[in-house]
Image (spheres, grey):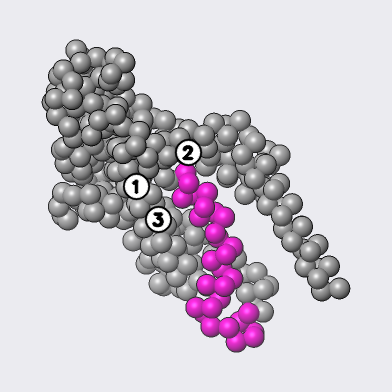
Amino acid sequence: MTASVAIIGSRHDGSGAARFLRRLFLHPGAMVGTIVFSALVLAAVLAPLIAPFDWNETDAGPRLAGPSIEHFFGTDLHGRDIFSRVIAGGRYSISLGMATVLLSLFMGSLIGLFLGYTGGKVDIWGCRCLDVLLGFPAIVLAIMIVSVLGVGLVNVVVAVAIAGVPRFARVVRGAVLVAREQLYIEAARALGASDYRIMRRHLLPNVTPTLVVLGTLDLGNAILSTATLSFLGLGAQPPTPEWGTMLSGGREFMRYAPWTMIFPGLALFLIVMSVNLVGDRLSQVLDPKAKDRR
């Protein structure tokens, strides 16, 4: 009897997971986004095997040479192969974006959970602080933080993450305010569950789908923000092949060597587009009120 129930439960879970995956990935936009994102990540991971040249090898070809069979994306001022640098740069740009989102997600979730569950004056003053941070454009706030912390990749991740915390905190707080009034929360309190246990075991799982969607959609913004700071000279420094740094280095040659900016910019466009396509579909699938959940 127990074995049969377990088998039925496992089949039910498997079919539910299969339906979720079908709704998510069989959508044309999500499918294209997944393929493009996977291809860029795979290329970044396998960069040493795929790249025909070392990303920092100077005089690998003629300086500022256009795209050719030998140099697919052309070369830069120092004769470095741009194709090799774009592939290697994905390691930096994608990793920085993911690290930024994870850090924002962690800090924002903790703050939102605490404020939403605690309530009272703590919630009021906490929301006012979040409102002050939200009053600054995220990129301006990130620039201010980097100017205090100093230039560097780690500082860029911290700065962009802090700038993104208010968005996550406000969303989590709103979800917690709704969830904490549910009957199962009152039942948990009546059974003597601690506040920490209620937040960890009951409230956090309720807001997890929202966090997954928000984190996915925010990944594109995080990659763009870190690339922007690198473009301004506040993040990755030459000769690091980060896409924003490559765009900054190629802007002087845009008129007569446009490939120095076109291909790093195209890589940024593709990664952000793919993430947004998947995030949009994910929000539809996980939102019970959405009309298009087929």
Position of residue 195 relative to residue 124, above or below, is below
> Which residue was labeled with disc 1?
95
* x and y, in percent, of residue 50 in the image: 35, 33
**Residue type at mark 2?**
Ser
> Which mark's residue is nearer the viewer, 2 or 3?
2
Q: Which residue in the rendered view is the most extreme toward the top? A: 256
Q: How many marks?
A: 3
Please name the residue shown 49% across and 62% down the image: 173
Please name the residue shown 67% across and 41% down the image: 23
**Residue type at mark 3?**
Leu
- Quadrant location of residue 106? bottom left
Q: What's the magenta region?
A: 188-217
Q: Which labelled disc corresponds to residue 38? A: 2
> Which mark's residue is nearer the viewer, 1 or 2?
2
Q: Report the side of 160 relative to 280 (left or right).
A: left
Q: Chief secondary structure of the magenta span?
A: helix
Which class describes the residues within 10 Å of circle 2: few (<14), some (14-19), or many (20+)?
A: some
Mark 1 and mark 3 lie on one chain; the one further toward the N terminus is: 1
Question: Tag 2's secondary structure?
Answer: helix
> Which residue was labeled with disc 3?
102
Please name the residue shown 16% across and 41% down the image: 237
Q: Which residue in the rendered view is the most extreme toward the bottom? A: 192
